[in-house]
Image (tube, coloured by chain):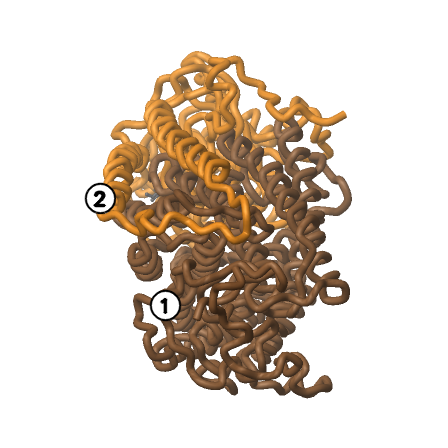
Chain colours: A orange, B brown
Amino acid sequence: MLPILLASDSNTDPWLNWFWYQMPPQQLSPFAKGVDATYYFIYYVCVFFFVAIMAAMTYFCIRYRRKHPGEMVDKNAPTHSSFLEAAWSIIPSILVVPMFYWGFTDFMDMRSMPDGAYNIGVTGQKWNWTFSYGNGKGIVGGKLENVDWHDKKSIIRDLPAMHVPVNTDIVLTMNSKDVLHSFYIPVFRTKQDVVPGRYTKLWFRADRTGQYDIFCTEYCGDKHSEMLAQLVVDTQEDFDKFYNRVTNLVILFPDPVKRGEYLFNTRGCSQCHSLDGSPKANGGPSFLGAWGTEVSFEDGTSAKMDENYIRESVVNPQAKIRKGFGKIMSVGLLSKDEEFEGIIAFIRDLNEKAKK
Amino acid sequence: MATVDVVRSGSAGHTETDNYLTHSKGLLSWLLTLDHKRIGVMYLIATSAAFLLGGFFALMVRTELWTTGRTIMNHDTYNQMFTLHGAVMVFLFIIPGIPAALGNFILPIMLGAKDVAFPRLNLASFYLWMMGATFFLAALSFTGLDTGWTFYTPYSTTDFGTGKDNAIISAVMGVFILGFSSIFTGLNFLVTIHTMRPPGMTWFRMPLFLWAIYSTAIIQVLATPVLAITLLLLLVEKTLGFGIFDPQLGGDPVLFQHFFWFYSHPAVYIMILPAMGVISELIGVNCRRHIFGYRFIAYSSVAIALLGFLVWGHHMFTSGQSKLASVVFSAITFSVAIPSAIKIFNWLSTMYKGSITFNAPFLYALSFMFLFTIGGLTGLFLATLSVDVHLHDTYFVVAHFHYVMVGGALTSFLGGLFHWWPKISGKMYSETPARISALLVFLGFNLTFLPQFVMGTRGMPRRYYNYLPEFEPFHQWSTIGAYVLGAGALLAFATVIHSIFRGKPAPMNPWGGASLEWTCSSPPPHNNFDKAPSVEDCYDYDKLVWDEKTGGYLMRK
Ligand SMILES: [Cu+2]
Ligand SMILES: [Cu+2]
């Protein structure tokens, strides 16, 4: 059966629906309304001129059709008219001014990042998006595999979902690991190319909860068309739940050693502590092979490197200062039980690794 | 009628049997010819072949898009298909189609000249084109290039081990050779128009087709060298490892887009200006009415050519270029809209109080008016910054530029082909199938691309192999339309070819044109004109008289 040409999933104004160039039904950001208003202004100007030109053309075709090949035309018909020509240079010139102006102001709005916005990192890589929350504390990714393209539910299920809180300014800081991509959210009427070697930004504020499509719109190779994602606008409570889930280290790294390694690399420990046995200049002792050894302090005492010592060294670094090192390690780098569990497991595991 | 004193034979006063087709025989007499008419015909055959090839790729693309998910080919093949489609259509058909094929044939005759200023350069440009085309096609197919016709870096320069590494260089090299051929043609036309106009043909007595070709030639000569610079930079980056476009070497991938569009946007006007020139002729002749606002149309061609150099950044509003740059490019882009609008209104006024005949060329011209108006108007959405951010790289853009390129360049190419075919071949094509072809092209075209505006507005990105299921009905209409359009185009070519064997001999002036090409016989003699004809107003149709016997028009003495 032939598809229905005017098939539409929208339930908006049937009059608008009749028109072909209808914007997506939902508008979700402060600038979506502005963009749509400008869009419809241009649209009606275009419809007016198109209908007028076509009507005149049709009328002339009928009225002045040639009845005999020898027919001659009225010699006095004008061949130019300064008045008309001025009119149709000036009137269109005037009409494009508001188009330009509204387009310009809304564009500046889209491209000027608001202060104090919530920041989410976006990384594009052939062919999926990853979203990072809380400066990398939580990472969300996903990949399409074996989907049924005729079943939207199956597509959505596998896609990475970018959760954002409702009624909050969000700024995306975007970067690509390989080629150009472009991050496009139709309901916000906004998109921005994602460029390797450069950070580009995009902002929006969702004023309604719901789930919407995100596309890659810059051609990036084979599976460009599968580089999709979902935008999930949550209430603040739901978003907090989501945030806690994606940043929960136990869920992200069930293995304590992996968790410890992650903490070692992301909480700054690696700036002062090495893993190769030699202490860093202006830093602290190396962790390699340190587990279980007897360490001596500035005040002449000594202690065994065990769970309690590690915990104390991080909670209260100034309590015992290792011989030959300074009082430079700051307080409060780790605080949760699962974090200590991780770092202890990591340091202990280094001994195992060293043996091998 | 018999009382009117008329000129019965071509102004050249040659015998009817001697014409450029029969002047000399043998394959070599064609391959080594310096006759602009024969070169024009060879270009016509070559560009038409390119069109059919590009059309085949288009149908492959549309067929694959019949359903979301796989229809007939895999991701990679699909990506190569749309790359081939775009690249072949743009570089091998639309850019050379009207200027090199129709222009080469008609321009010197319209000027009352024997040939172009540099006939050898002209032949060289043809062979350069053939070389470029072969090289380009080979590059595209052997490397399996799948970057789209825009070749954006760094996708096109990095390949992650698939062997497509240097594809971009050979492709740009191909484009550059083609560009060189285009420079030769442009230069030739510029000099010809400057130096070889006959007595009496002042600048403002030139047919508008010549103004259009003249403006096009300016762009060809000025814009094409940028391709050479781009190629050079790509080579330097590849061989010496300087970071220019590749971010891994510290280059800037967006820079490539500037270079690309600095050539390719003016190239858009290389595609559309000659089309506008053809339409000016078709409308004048078939409305039998002095073209309205001649000077405005002529000036607007030049204005478009010059402004066309200043708007390339409108392709990059979302690329990360500076806000200020985007704003300036948007403003200048709106200013290009005005000269195009002027042309439409002038053509429309030419129809007022005319005597309109609906032969195939005029049907194509009408269809041009319809399609180009939509193409031009939808450009306003894309020139508007905020709206473009939404529509950029969606099907809206695809639909927009097809309305301009295909609706503009293809319909005028076919219209011009039918219009000048009696002159080119000396045969009349049969009107009915030609008209049906115009109708099919028109209907098929709209069916293909109107649904794409809807999809684009609703967020369907371009260059997608799979798509969300809600877009499927629109894609299916579009695919049906593409087949109708394809059938129309095939019918047009079939009609033309059929006439070579079965067509009635063409009279000197079948349509009642008043420009010089209608004063020499059909087909024209080898030398076009023995002595330079004197020229009056090329849009004054009063001097023509209908002659029942030959089925053409004769000039009053
Ligand atoms: Cu992509
Ligand atoms: Cu452009």
- Examine the rendering and report whether any part of residue B444 can be seen: yes
Q: Residue at x 33, y 23 (%)?
A: A30
Query: Which residue lies under the disc numbered 2?
Result: A83
Q: Where in the figure is residue B488, as x and y percent of width and height?
A: 68, 48
Gap between marks 1 and 2 measured at Cα: 24 Å
Front one among B280 and B409: B280
Front one among B324 and B362: B362
Q: Quadrant of the N terminus of chain A?
A: top right
Total label count?
A: 2
- Examine the rendering and report whether any part of residue A340 can be seen: no
Label 2 Cα neighbours within 10 Å, binned few <14 / some 14-19 / many ≥20: few
| Chain under callout 2 | A
Q: Residue A317 shows which numbered tag?
A: none
Q: Where in the figure is residue A272, as x and y percent of width and height?
A: 38, 47
Q: Residue at x 48, y 34 (%)?
A: A131
The amino acid on which the numbered mark 1 sits, given as a three-letter code, is Met
Q: Quadrant of residue B222?
A: bottom left
Q: Is residue A350 above or below residue A246?
A: below
Front one among B324 and B33: B33
Q: Residue B206 shows which numbered tag?
A: 1
Q: Where in the figure is residue B543, as x and y percent of width and height?
A: 42, 63
Q: Quadrant of residue B441?
A: top right
Dot 1 and dot 2 residues touching (CB under 8 Å): no
Callouts 1 and 2 on one subunit: no
Q: Residue at x 62, y 75 (%)?
A: B130
Q: Is residue A267 above or below residue B264?
A: above
| Chain under callout 1 | B
Query: Seen in the image, is B36 located left or right of residue A195?
Result: right
Q: Secondary structure at mark 2?
A: helix
The amino acid on which the numbered mark 2 sits, given as a three-letter code, is Phe
Q: Is residue A347 above or below residue B325?
A: above
Q: Where in the figure is residue B164, as x and y percent of width and height?
A: 63, 64
